[in-house]
Amino acid sequence: MKVIEDYKIIKFKTNTVKITKVIRRNEEVQEYVVILLENKKNKRIVIHPLTSFIYDNWRRKEHNTQLARAKHIVAFLNHIFFDYYDILMVDNLEELHIKHAIHFLEKKVSDGCVKSTIYAYDSTIMHFYYYLTKKKLLKNYQIEDFKWSYDTARKKKNLESMLIPEMEYVPTNRNVGEQKAKTLEQEHVPIFIMTAIDVAPRIALGIYLSIFGGLRGSEVMSVKRSTIKSIGVRGEHGLIVKLATDRLNSKGSGNRVKSPGIQPIQAIKSLLSELYISHDLNYPAPIDGSDSLFVNKHGKTMQYQTYNELFNKVKESFIQTLKKSPNPDDKIAALNYKSLKWSTHIGRGTYSNSIAEQVNSILEIMRLRRDRSPNSSTGYLTNTKNSIKILNDSMEELLEGK
């Protein structure tokens, strides 16, 4: 790949191509991650042959895994060939050297990337160099230069890094600036939901599904109206939702279900029923025919990006509400929520914290969370409290004041 003279108008990017195939008389949407070259002036794009790198290594992995690896390589290629071409002067793939990858990783460190992110980039780039070497596209390396180790616990081979040992600095595991809030305090859950009803009613039901059903934000966006089963009248005693990715109406990594299956939603007092009825009345089925439970302001399927933007508005308003509270504990909590990073995933964490004290084993938590590994659930086995009682008491007080 020879870099053209006006290299600043070209960039690498990723995209997902969806192809509908008829298999045994049933339509099936298949997704393919591609690496593209785009002309930023005229927006023309071509699929780059390096797309084969993704499928050579991760063809059997989930779409999100393929997309993440593709984004790693796209960021690296843009860094080498375009963003820092004046410094590195790399004109084609065969000139690539380990020092170029180190330059990229050290720039990521200076940008504030945490250790896990650096190691993720390192893994992808090492596989990329190995791939190019196998294809005889690197003049500086031979297959014998790459070393492998064996992970006995996972029973798999790992490609050893040539990059990390040569870096001047790698972030440590713990970074104070990256601390995250994993759960809402139980006494603040009703306030958070009421804030959502006031600030962003379009997603208030979604926030409830996350906090009392453990749905990830992308899974909230994937819920279909026709797959919801009501326990009692209109969610009076809870809901059961069937989760599966709608490949036709999902974009990128949003609106996707990591763990398909059936998920029960708890009913706390009458709030679930009220939210469900109100949502159905004010936000009818999307005009694009997707059957999505959540719609944007244009009446079409809501995407995760929109959900996240609305969630952040609720988050900021919630913190301001606590700041103005006459309760000094709320004021302190507001400072804590403000200082820590947290996102839509806090709903799933809050749900997990709630169910942890109600079950007797990690396997039960895994089942309720639809986890594939116990590692995701172990953090919720300790430091739990009588959350359901607190929630019911707080919710009853708030509902009585409506």
Image (cartoon, rainbow, N blue to C red):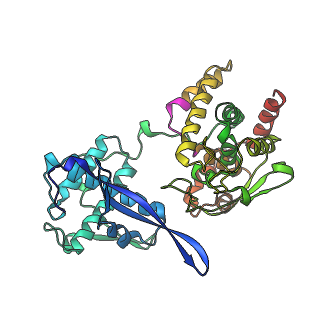
- Residue 344 drawn in magenta: yes
Q: Which residues are magenta?
A: 337-345
Task: Please tell me whether the stretch drawn in magenta is mainly helix, strand or loop.
Answer: loop
- In this rendering, position of residue 266 left or right of residue 26: right
In the image, is residue 221 above or below residue 54?
above
- The residue at the point 19 percent across, 58 percent down is 98
- Using the image as rendered, state which of residue 133 and residue 198 is in the foreground: 198
Q: Quadrant of residue 319?
A: top right
- The residue at the point 14 percent across, 46 percent down is 87
Residue located farthest toward the right when viewing the structure as drawn: 233
Residue 153 in percent (x, y) is at 45, 69
- Using the image as rendered, state which of residue 201 and residue 115 is in the foreground: 201
In the image, is residue 274 above or below residue 48?
above
- The residue at the point 55 percent across, 58 percent down is 375
- Using the image as rendered, state which of residue 285 and residue 155 is in the foreground: 285
The quarter of the picture where the N terminus appears is bottom left
